[in-house]
């Protein structure tokens, strides 16, 4: 995987132009015998032609249908070979059984891309999987770009190219957000919510279905390179090219184009659903989480959190004015909401600081009768009764040095009984304040739901004030923004401090003997307790004397993994005599209990002083390959599965972040007066293990250092036991 | 607190009739010089009279204003004393400074209740607190019912009595839900969302503000007794009568009227906000959580979760058809949503089982070309193209024996561009299926937001199919329903197995000496390690011989709490000689390190065999008084604050539930092959500690048993060290 990061960008990514901005398209599956527009059974081919027309597609459109000479005023040919001009992209609105043949003939005719709407591929049984395999082969072997199958296609807004199967409403809003969703239905659901409920414009909508050809990762890369796109949003069920995901995440950070992703398929049931829906392998949730965190990808947990986070990140004025801080000021006319939003802020780790002393002394000057000087700032009924109050309270928050982001709780919903409307009375004041402010201002409603009032939404959005609905989503979105800022600030391109890949001998398959395992760790700079394999009691005693007492003895046999259960371990031996006795004892114990075991000898190891016991290892994820796993021994890992996961290569800085993410982190910094541990040495070892993962590649199936003893600051760490599995 | 539960219901609760359904009201603060209806500055008094008229209030309305003989066609008197007839309730729409005098004169004139809208009481400075104190005195000493101050008042829908300051929209929907919210703004926000976005009708809206008189607990009790109310919803910042909360929770369970509460003020900042807003003491979040769990109160975490949970619980047909099970079936036209809703279900602990074998064999008969036989059931594009498919898929879920609750993902929102509408095509099929079904059916949308289409919402709600918005809220609401069902099923009235309160001697204030503490524990049936206080080495040796070796010695001094830090503890003493030596050693250690300490002697205690170390104690919550706290020693309690909290009296069954709520619970049931612990004995001790809390009452400031050693099943538990603090 490390190799990926050293490849040049051009060799990593295909040019998607024939799919995303084709100069000419051929539509297969349009008909003269089509019912009226908008009806359920209108052929998708006709709908695509209508979409292309409505969007003002500047390229050439032809239809393919042996029955007609023209369809919807487009020239129509009996087959692809009959089309006189070159076709960039073919759009297949035909039953799935025809798809592989048609695409293969398209590729043969020089077409470079295709969009396949129909379902019935890898998401169903064997027949579908075989169909999809032909598409995948075409994509790989002929570099033919395929969107789908089982999708709505691609819609390039600024390129006016909607190769898109779904109805596109009038008044489509162009803007900086590119959206990719495997699911067709959710692609339009998300897009419509962004446009209608947030006034957020789009540069692309892609529904990519089963990703038989072009993958989510490739679309993300295309968006990052696209000049019209500033923010990328995605709903993904499964990644197909995880190594490219890490590369595109780096590129996104470098270009400052945030990737905001909702990843479905966290549970067993949803992984079953994802496999059924788009033939996706969802991947282990905790590994995906780790990859997102490490790559600076903004991970959201619900559709509404996605919508509000995109609403915030895509509001250019807001983002520009944000200093990166997480101190939130809140103004509300409802004291109850002040309480709720404070809880929501706490839940996501935002600060709601007290007002500055300056504000507290200045506010009474401009509002002598107004008693509340808190944050959240409760405007009370007074702000409804006296129009002077709201603007002054808002300005106080804008001017307050304790506050990084100003939020206003505003009923922006447009309830059916118009007499309930009150938000408009305040939105003008916010628009005015925002025009002059140098601090970011956002608004949020209390309840999510009901129509959003365009009279409030549109002028505020134009003034750089984004809307979010509900305190919980609003605070989550703000937290994402501050985290993203923090990540970019401390970000450095990966691989900079990674050791150069070295070549290692090929190991025999199976579990490495202890001595060999320790030698291998040592060769990567991982400190190990001095360890020797001995064949008899005398050798053991001599080895013990050479490494110094006290020592431990452990039986060595490829057949025995739980050594102490069989009486195969003896600890704290203080003399050569004790070592000799112990040698015989543990050999006899184990041969008595497991007579068939092939005993290689007894390992003599220097006893390691007490410290914090951790586990550190490498396991293989079906999606990401080797990942580094780290945690505390005992109840934290056994009961709470409190482990940190990193995707190699892992820098020292990333190792430190991993450790900070563990619940047990305070154990390392010195819980209740205990000395702090040698975190630096621990980070060195995580870095070394990451190097080991990238250097050994596929031959390393698993590594399990348990325990890794972490001593007090300055005293290092030691691997006491290690299991290396070669494949 | 235990005493509360033995009081008769009548002695616990006041009759709220004069406030909730007054026969006559006097409005102070209405004027002839009022601007037009609906304007911001219309006097609240006028608005209340308009509300009363619009609602058809059947009682008598008079106004009080020395300037007029009539206001809005109501007779108007110069003061309360001048009103010829008896007045049940006075409504004060006047500045706060006039309120105390007016209420006192009303009480003197025989009025029995009052509603106070104005702010400026306990939520502001000293002056306001004094004002509120006069109201509280009036409530207590003259049994005068006060709603507010700092509120919108009460609205009794079926009694047609809106003593309510806010504008009430036309088309108010009457129904089974009673709502109380301290916050006025949120009371109407929640009510409007329920009526407009969920078609849920209300029996009452109460905004009770600062609760200077009638408390949230009293309103809850009133609602539970009210024949028109079936479900009670609340937004609460602080409880004033927590003991009554526990009583009303019991009554709610007995009456089967669910209490659904959103409790604000979980964080330090929000507690500051709550104090400012309504003068509320929010209470420790974890104690509130414990009280809710123990009382079967449904706790929701956001306004939208409140709205969706109420939508579900108030749908009578749905609830009646629910068998209590948590196996969810899902039908959606979007495969992406199938993935997301599965994740949401997993997050809250609902099951999404596979379809039964019967369904899997029967579905292909009715839908031969439909390949998907999963749950969630993805209707795919096919269900949009062929109208036969959706009803058959729905019926398959209804008929499936593996499924307790059927949910349908339906776009029930009504987007501005009407051509996007597709939900109506399916809602008729659901309505038809629901009419014939004996299984509960609910619908949920993917995204929360946008107008809800009344053409979908109303007929479905009428057919017993509630709407929820967003997979996350929908699954949370369903989980609440199954939990509530489970709680009621296993519920038994509290106090049944509580020991009778016994009288105890008065202890001197301070920390009890070890021997006295152990005697006290023993008197409550808590097993303790045999423990004797000895004055000299000989006494210690004799004591050790009498209780049996090995023993531990611990220095006993009121000035020393961390005994081992001073060398004041010696463990595992195996003989009288060792005991004598240890006696001198620890005495000398401690006097050397702390010469001023007053040494009472040395405690001799039988060594307790190893086991699982827990902590068990009593602490005082500012709101609930004594609460029982239980957890595991070590990293779980130190690092993760993993403690269970119970409100006495705690039954054996409740003690068991508490333990099950601990993250460390698997340690007791036998983690990784270890033997399971004596959970029964542990529950006995929790029960005993709860008795101790209720028996000793206020003189017990704190109890801390640490460690309480829990042995393997059948071998009991032992308190090894205990600290008892008397106040």
Image (cartoon, coloured by chain):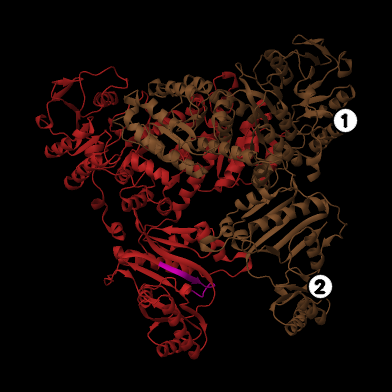
Chain colours: A brown, B red
Instruction: Report the front residue among B45 and A16.
Output: A16
Residue visible at 34% across and 72% down in the picture: B512
User: Counting other residues with Cα less than 10 Å from the Cα at mark 1, is it few (<14), some (14-19), or many (20 or more)?
Assistant: few
The chain carrying label 2 is A
* Mark 2, secondary structure of its residue: strand
Residue B381 seen in render: yes
Which residue has dot 1 on it?
A: A142
Residue B236 seen in render: no
Q: How many marks?
A: 2
Which residue has dot 2 on it?
A: A533
* Mark 1, secondary structure of its residue: helix
Residue visible at 76% across and 63% down in the picture: A723
The chain carrying label 1 is A
Residue B536, image quadrant: bottom left
**Placement of B395 over or under A51, stated as above or below:** below
In this picture, which residue range is highlighted in magenta?
Answer: B704-717
Q: Is residue B714 magenta?
A: yes
**Placement of B147 over or under A632, stated as above or below:** above
Would you say B461 lies left or right of A187 here?
left
Q: Is residue A208 magenta?
A: no
């Amino acid at each position: 995987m490390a190799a990926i990061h050293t490849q040049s960008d051009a060799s990593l990514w295909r040019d998607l132009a024939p799919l995303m901005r084709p100069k000419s398209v051929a539509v297969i599956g349009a008909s003269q015998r089509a019912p009226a527009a908008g009806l359920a059974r209108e052929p998708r081919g006709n709908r695509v032609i209508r979409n292309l027309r409505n969007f003002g597609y500047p390229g050439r459109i032809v239809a393919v249908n042996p029955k007609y000479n023209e369809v919807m005023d487009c020239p129509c040919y009996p087959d692809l070979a009959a089309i006189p001009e070159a076709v960039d992209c073919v759009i297949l609105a035909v039953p799935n059984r025809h798809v592989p043949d048609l695409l293969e003939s398209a590729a043969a005719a020089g077409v470079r891309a295709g969009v396949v709407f129909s379902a019935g591929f890898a998401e169903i049984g064997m027949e579908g999987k075989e169909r999809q395999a032909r598409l995948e082969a075409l994509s790989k072997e002929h570099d033919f770009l395929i969107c789908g199958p089982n999708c709505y296609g691609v819609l390039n807004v600024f390129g006016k190219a909607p190769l898109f199967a779904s109805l596109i409403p009038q008044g489509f809003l162009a803007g900086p957000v590119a959206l990719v969703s495997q699911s067709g239905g959710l692609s339009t659901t998300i897009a419509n919510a962004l446009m209608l409920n947030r006034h957020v414009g789009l540069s692309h909508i892609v529904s990519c279905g089963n990703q038989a050809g072009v993958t989510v990762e490739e679309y993300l890369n295309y968006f990052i390179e696209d000049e019209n796109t500033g923010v990328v949003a995605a709903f993904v069920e499964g990644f197909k090219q995880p190594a490219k995901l890490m590369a595109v995440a780096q590129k996104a950070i470098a270009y400052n184009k945030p990737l905001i992703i909702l990843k479905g398929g966290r549970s067993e049931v949803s992984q079953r659903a994802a496999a059924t829906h788009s033939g996706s392998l969802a991947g282990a949730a905790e590994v995906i989480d780790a990859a997102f965190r490490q790559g600076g990808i903004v991970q959201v947990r619900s559709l509404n959190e996605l919508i509000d986070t995109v609403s915030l990140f895509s509001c250019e004025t807001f983002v520009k004015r944000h200093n990166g801080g997480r101190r939130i000021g809140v103004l509300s006319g409802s004291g109850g909401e002040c309480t709720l939003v404070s809880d929501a802020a706490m839940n996501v780790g935002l600060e709601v600081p007290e007002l500055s002393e300056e504000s507290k002394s200045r506010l009474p000057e401009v509002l002598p009768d107004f008693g509340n000087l808190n944050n959240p700032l409760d405007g009370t009924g007074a702000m409804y009764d006296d129009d002077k109050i709201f603007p002054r309270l808002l300005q106080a928050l804008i001017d307050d040095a304790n506050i990084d982001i100003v939020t206003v709780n505003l009923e922006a919903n447009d309830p059916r009984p118009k007499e309930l409307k009150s938000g408009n009375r305040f939105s003008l004041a916010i628009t005015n304040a925002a025009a002059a402010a140098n601090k970011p201002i956002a608004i949020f409603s209390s309840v999510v739901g009901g129509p959003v009032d365009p009279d409030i939404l549109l002028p505020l959005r134009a003034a750089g004030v984004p809307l979010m609905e509900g305190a919980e989503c609003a605070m989550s979105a703000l937290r994402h923004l501050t985290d993203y800022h923090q990540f970019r600030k401390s970000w450095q391109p990966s691989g900079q401090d990674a050791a150069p890949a070295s070549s290692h001998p090929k190991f025999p398959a199976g579990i490495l003997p202890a001595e060999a395992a320790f030698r291998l760790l040592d060769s990567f700079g991982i400190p190990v307790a001095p360890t020797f394999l001995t064949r008899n009691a005398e050798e053991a005693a001599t080895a013990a004397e050479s490494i110094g007492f006290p020592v431990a003895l452990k039986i060595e046999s490829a057949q025995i993994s739980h050594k102490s259960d069989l009486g195969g371990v003896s600890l704290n031996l203080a003399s050569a005599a004790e070592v000799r006795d112990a040698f015989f004892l543990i050999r006899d114990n184990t041969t008595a209990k497991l007579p068939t075991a092939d005993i290689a000898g007894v390992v003599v190891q220097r006893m390691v002083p007490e410290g914090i016991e951790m586990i550190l290892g490498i396991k293989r994820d079906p999606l990401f390959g080797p990942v580094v796993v780290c945690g505390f021994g005992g109840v934290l890992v056994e009961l709470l599965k409190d482990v940190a996961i990193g995707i190699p290569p892992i820098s020292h800085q990333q190792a430190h972040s991993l450790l900070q993410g563990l619940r047990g982190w305070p154990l390392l910094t010195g819980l209740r007066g205990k000395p702090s541990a040698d975190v630096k040495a621990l980070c060195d070892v995580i870095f070394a293990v990451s190097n080991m993962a990238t250097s050994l590649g596929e031959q390393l199936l698993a590594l399990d250092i348990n325990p890794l003893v972490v001593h007090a600051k300055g005293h290092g760490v030691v691997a006491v036991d290690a299991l290396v599995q070669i494949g």
